[in-house]
Image (cartoon, grey):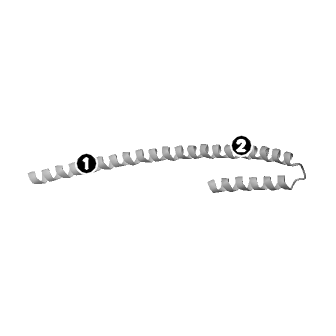
C-alpha cells in the first residue's frame, strides 16, 4: 500500500513538473505554479495517509475484538470439556467403588 502511495505521489509530481516546465510562461510564473502544485500535492498526500492510517486502525480494532471473542469462546469450550471430563472421572470412580464393594 505504501509503495502504491509513493508511486502515485512521485508520478503526480513528475507529471506536474513536466507540465509546468514545458508550458510557455515566465520563470516567475512557473516557480509560483510549482510551489502551488507542490503544496496541493503535499496536502493530498497528507489526506491520503491520514485516511489510510484511520482505516488501518479500524481494521486493527475489528481484528482485536474478533480475537478476543474467539479467545472467550475457546476458554468457555475448554471449561466445558474440563467439567465433562471431571464428571466422567467421577462416574468412573463411583462405578469402581461399587464394583469393589460387590
- How many marks the image carries: the answer is 2
- Tell me the quarter of the picture where residue 42 sits: top right
- Please name the residue shown 17% across and 51% down the image: 93
Q: Point out which mark residue 43 bears.
A: 2
Are dots 2 and 1 in contact, CB under 8 Å? no
Which residue does the numbered mark 1 point to in the structure image? 86
Q: State whether residue 97 appears in this view.
A: yes
Comes first in the chain, label 2 or label 1: 2
| x then y, percent, for residue 47 | 68, 43
Answer with left or right where residue 5 lies relative to residue 84: right
> Which is nearer the eye, 41 or 61?
41
- Please name the residue shown 39% across and 48% down the image: 74
Q: Residues within 10 Å of mark 2 (few under 14, many from 20)?
A: few
Answer with left or right where residue 21 lies relative to residue 79: right
Circle nearer the viewer, 2 or 1? 2
| x then y, percent, for residue 94 | 17, 49
**Under tag 2, what secondary structure?**
helix
**Under tag 1, what secondary structure?**
helix
* Alpha carbon separation for disc pair 2 and 1: 64 Å
Amino acid at each position: 500500500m505504501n509503495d502504491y502511495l509513493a508511486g502515485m505521489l512521485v508520478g503526480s509530481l513528475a507529471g506536474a513538473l513536466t507540465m509546468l516546465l514545458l508550458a510557455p510562461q515566465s520563470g516567475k510564473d512557473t516557480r509560483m505554479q510549482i510551489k502551488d502544485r507542490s503544496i496541493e500535492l503535499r496536502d493530498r498526500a497528507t489526506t491520503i495517509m491520514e485516511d489510510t492510517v484511520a482505516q488501518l486502525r479500524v481494521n486493527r480494532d475489528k481484528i482485536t475484538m474478533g480475537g478476543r471473542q474467539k479467545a472467550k469462546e475457546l476458554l468457555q469450550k475448554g471449561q466445558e470439556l474440563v467439567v465433562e471430563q471431571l464428571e466422567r472421572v467421577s462416574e468412573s470412580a463411583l462405578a469402581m467403588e461399587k464394583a469393589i464393594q460387590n
